[in-house]
Image (tube, rainbow, N blue to C red):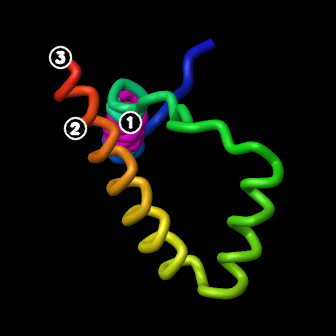
């Protein structure tokens, strides 16, 4: 079965197909650039509960700041100790 269209309708269909292809290209690009989100650590339930309490007390931004500072200090000490052993 053939569909009868005017030249104007054919042009509109062509434009619509081009736009769909452009949209599909964007989805393909997002897919190709995506990464699996893997957590860096697995929190124990009691640790997560303490973090929630701290978030409620300090707010998310302040909690993030405090935890990042603590983690950096612990890891830098740990890494420097490992470097001294070698």
10 or 6: nearer the viewer = 10
In the structure shown, which secondary structural element does the residue marked by tag 3 occupy? Answer: loop
Q: Pointer 3 and pointer 2: residues touching (CB < 8 Å)?
A: no
Residue 80 in view (yes/no): yes
| Among numbered discs 3 and 1, the one appearing first in the sequence | 1
Is 81 left, or right, of 31 in this rendering? left
Q: Label 2 belongs to which residue?
A: 80
Q: Residue at x 69, y 87 (%)?
A: 57
Image: magenta residue range: 13-28
Q: Label 1 belongs to which residue?
A: 30
User: Magenta region's main secondary structure?
Assistant: helix
| Among numbered discs 2 and 1, the one appearing first in the sequence | 1
Q: Is residue 27 magenta?
A: yes
Q: Residue at x 57, y 38 (%)?
A: 41
Q: Label 3 belongs to which residue?
A: 86
Residue 18 location, quadrant: top left
Is 82 left, or right, of 20 in this rendering? left
Q: Residues within 10 Å of mark 1 (few under 14, many from 20)?
A: few
Q: CA distance from mark 2 to mark 1?
A: 39 Å
């Amino acid at each position: 079965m053939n569909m009868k269209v005017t030249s104007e309708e054919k042009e509109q269909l062509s434009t619509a197909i081009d736009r769909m292809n452009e949209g599909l290209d964007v989805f393909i690009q997002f897919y190709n650039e995506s990464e699996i989100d893997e957590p860096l650590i697995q929190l124990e339930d009691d640790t997560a509960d303490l973090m929630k309490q701290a978030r409620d007390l300090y707010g998310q931004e302040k909690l993030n700041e405090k935890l990042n500072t603590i983690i950096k200090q612990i890891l830098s000490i740990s890494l420097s100790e490992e470097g001294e052993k070698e």
